[in-house]
Amino acid sequence: MGTDEARRRFGAAAVARLASVDAAGVPHLVPITFAALGETIYSAVDRKPKRTRALRRLANIAANPRVAVLADHYEDDWERLWWVRADGSARVLDAASAEAREALGALAARYERYRAQAPPGPVVAIDVERWTGWSADGDGPEHRTPLGRICSPG
């Protein structure tokens, strides 16, 4: 799987998982909806019920902006399994900023629910520095290297 195919598969996924860590290194993993624009992945704090608006992912990004986002595909036919991970640095954007408004528009284009009720934000912007991935339909486990490199087994 090359970089372009990894981006295509990632962008076609309906949800992904955002991994962050707090200042003490404790991991936190949450499912997210997202839109990818170029080398940046955007996700917004939406209106789903939450215990608080002070979300752990936002505090973690403030303490340590290094994050990973994983999209994957599973089905019983294991020949169709794949995953793509984007590693990068996250920023929290005020929903009123120009970049956040563009991201919210991209999210609304992807998700019908967001067209009916726009997320209030803030928006998380992840600047991707590295794409990695694996697929059962051509790249065996021995090929788990940064995408775009050509590797041979052994």
Image (cartoon, rainbow, N blue to C red):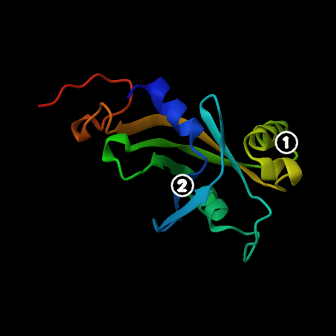
Looking at the image, is mark 1 or mark 2 nearer the viewer?
2
Q: Residues within 10 Å of mark 1 (few under 14, many from 20)?
A: few
Q: Is residue 4 left or right of residue 45?
A: left
In this picture, residue 68 sits left or right of residue 144: right
Q: Hey, which quadrant is residue 17 in on the image?
A: bottom right
Tell me the residue that label 2 is attached to.
17
> In x, y percent, where is residue 39?
59, 31
Q: Residue at x 74, y 74 (%)?
A: 52
Q: Give x and y (percent) for residue 128.
A: 54, 37
Indicate left or right for 125 with 140 as reference. right
Q: Mark 1 vs mark 2: which is more N-terminal? A: 2
Q: Nearer the viewer, residue 104 or 9?
A: 9
Residue occupying image coordinates x 74% and y 46%: 111
Compared with residue 22, is residue 74 higher up or lower down, i.e. above or below? above
**Position of residue 6 measured from the top left corner of the image (x, y, whole percent):** 46, 32
Residue type at the position of mark 1: Ser
- Looking at the image, do the residues carrying marks 1 and 2 touch, with CB atoms under 8 Å apart? no
Which mark is drawn over residue 70? none
Residue 28: x %, y % from top left: 52, 65
Between 65 and 82, the residue placed more toward the observer is: 82
